[in-house]
Amino acid sequence: MNSALVSCGIELPKAFLGAKVVSNGGSHPNNTCSDTTKLFNSTRNYPRISCSDDRGSRLRLAAIAADKETKVGQLDQELRSESGHDAVNGSVNGAVNGATNGATNGAIKRRETIIEEPESISPYDSSVPLRPRSILNYMNEVKYFLTDDGGPPRWFSPIVPPPPADAPTLFFLPGMDGTGLGLIMHYESLGRLFNMQCLHIPVRDRTPFAGLLKIAEEAVLAEHKHRPKSPIYLLGDSLGGTLALALAARNPKLDLVLIVANPATSFDRSQLQPHFPLLQVTPSELYGVVPYLLSFIMGDPIKMAEAQVKQDASPVDRALQMRESLLSLLPTLPTLADVVPKDSLVWKLELLHSAALYANSRLHAVRAQVLVLASGNDQMLPSADEAERLRKILPNCRTRYFKESGHTLLLEGGLNLASVIKGAGIYRRGRNIDYVTDFVIPTQAEFDDAYNKYAKLIWQATSPVFFSTKDTGKVEQNLSNVPNDRPVLFVGNHMYMGLDLSLIIYQMFKERGIMIRGLAHPMLFETKMEEDLQEGTMPDLFREFGAVPVSGNSMFKLLKKGYSTLLYPGGAREALHRKGETHKIFWPKRSEFVRMAARFGVTIVPVSTVGEDDLLDIILDLDDLRRIPTFEERFVYPITNIRGDLNEDVGDQSLHLPFAAPKLTPGRLYIKFGKPIVTAGREKELQPDRAQAQAIYKQVESAVEEGLEYLQWKRQEDPYREFVPRFLYEQRAGGNKQAPTFKP
């Protein structure tokens, strides 16, 4: 039995893939019709290969919960309790609302508050951890998809934990292999975001492009009819990319979001065009070597094998893991000869040609939101050039560029497709994106990946130390005094360029299980300054980890939903301060955040960060740029000043390209969380009385300034403040032990 395919709660035999189903549901022994007109006019009832009995029951619970407007987790617990089972201890990844919260090293007490529970849960709450996958999973599973039946194409849904009840549907349109397994490395991570349906095209099927388009279109229209207010995602890989674009062109009024990986719309410019005729005359005895050649052309085996290598392993361990992964991968390559036999390969090359012609002739009609994923090392198609072309043609198109990847991008290591989708800011559950409610808390793998890419180097260079303050005022070197029994509003000074942001969010989640969401400048959510071949950037990271455009409405929604929130009142003026303004705060004289916190009984924690003067030297600040002719026009972003109504210095929020250089021997970062300020029970006092709220505001501001003074004074006692002694100490300890600091 194949564990990847099941239907109607009953596990299917492998031979099911070979069954043809006609309109009356009976098996048909003949080959599927290849005549385009006849296929378009037929009313075939293609079977939808769905989900396991367990997942089917969970989806039914989700549907019942949606009808009752209740929470899936609560309903699950109620039904289990009624049937005599134990209550659920945690929740499956991707479940929405009502889940019992967990923590990194133990359960966190459930928040007893009138504030809504966050709609997305921590990965630590999952009783079903995400399974690591690699190209070997594809090779092992694909043999079950190779029944020599000739068709018809059909849909299947991977067995994964259920997504939120209101999750949109994603249709995966496969590439040349046609199996629908091209997403196998992303099943679990995408399963937290979408209801997934994958198109399977049997190996001997000869349905033309127009027929495949009809099948995909019927499924999309049926989904739209069932859920007219929900967006529909089309994920197309190579050939599937042309299907997605053609379908969007035929249905410009549907709310579609397209994600196309190395789309075959560039097939007529393939660098392999001169060699395709040779495949038709290749002797059968020699065709067995073609899959080996194609594997190096369609994708980089090194990148594929890399998926099994742990990113946080030592260089020696990584080399050993890579060796083992490659040795296990190479013997499986002959399987590709069965996935794409000679006659099928020739047919699919013709299919690609007709698909490219069809899609390219209709690109002018595409109105959908499009994200093009382009590989820089694609040996089969000029994907990078195609991404630039599509971005210029399509009115709502953006790109993400993967410089080292090959044609089979989705089967290579180093790519987390769910992270790319969230980072690009295209994941939504309704007509328009809502950065507060559409947020899905990152998984442990996403946290680790972000740390390795963006924070690890800073962490190793600065060896940051964290302090928290007890109610008595005593300072301790840990975060144990930061409350996690209810949402917290963290208010602090903005370090230059926000270099401490990732460290604070990572450590707070790791040590206290608190997912902090930040209020960020609206520019980070604009796309007009993206390049034709845009690689993943810090704005992508901010969006993936829950940042929202700063505004009173955003803060209201975050606190109402029960999210802990990070606010820098100094904004861009503080984050891009001038020379000589290190550790100086620029806060507007407004107490709105205090009154907002009091409205929801949120605890305020002041945050002070010191150390940027030991890390960076500012070369040119905004005043310098304004003194140099034409420099301000070239290096200051032309955006609306969100604090233009303020006459004070803090209102000068011009965003400009920072000119700063890191010091060769960086110092240390010190981050202090002040004494918590409780607002619960003071709603009637603080909300209407602006004077009382302003007093709390001054208390928070003073606490941050006192924290800055405290850290600048105490760091002089740190024997490892300087880089060299700190580095030598930590290296002697094997790199796993942090150098000690001053006694608080």
Image (tube, grey):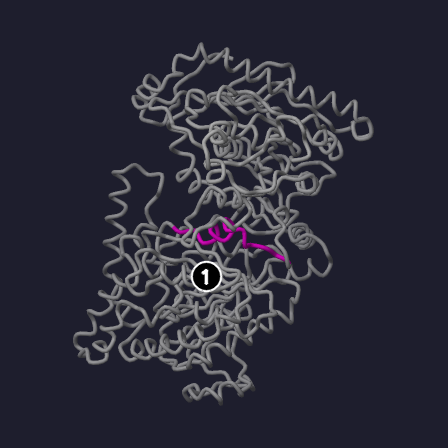
Q: Residue 692 lies in what quarter of the image?
A: top right
Q: Residue at x 50, y 23 (%)?
A: 466
Q: Do we see residue 455 in this rendering?
A: yes
- Magenta range: 415-430
Pick the front one: 98 or 359 = 359
Relative side of 423 to 596, left or right? left
Pick the front one: 466 or 700 = 700
Q: Residue 274 lies in what quarter of the image?
A: bottom left
Q: Residue at x 63, y 38 (%)?
A: 642
The amino acid type of the residue labelled 1 equals Lys
Q: Residue 384 lies in what quarter of the image?
A: bottom left
For mark 1, does the 10 Å Cα neighbourhood hold few (<14), some (14 to 19), or many (20 or more) residues?
A: few
Which residue is labeled 1 in the image?
A: 392
Where the N terminus falls, by quadrant?
Answer: bottom left
Relative side of 660 to 290, left or right? right
Q: Do we see residue 1 in this rendering?
A: no
Pick the front one: 562 or 6 = 562
Q: Is residue 309 above or below residue 516?
A: below
Relative side of 481 to 143, left or right? right
Q: Residue at x 61, y 50 (%)?
A: 438
Q: Is residue 427 above or below residue 446?
A: below
How many numbered tags mark residues here? 1
Residue 607 screen position, x and y as percent: 58, 24
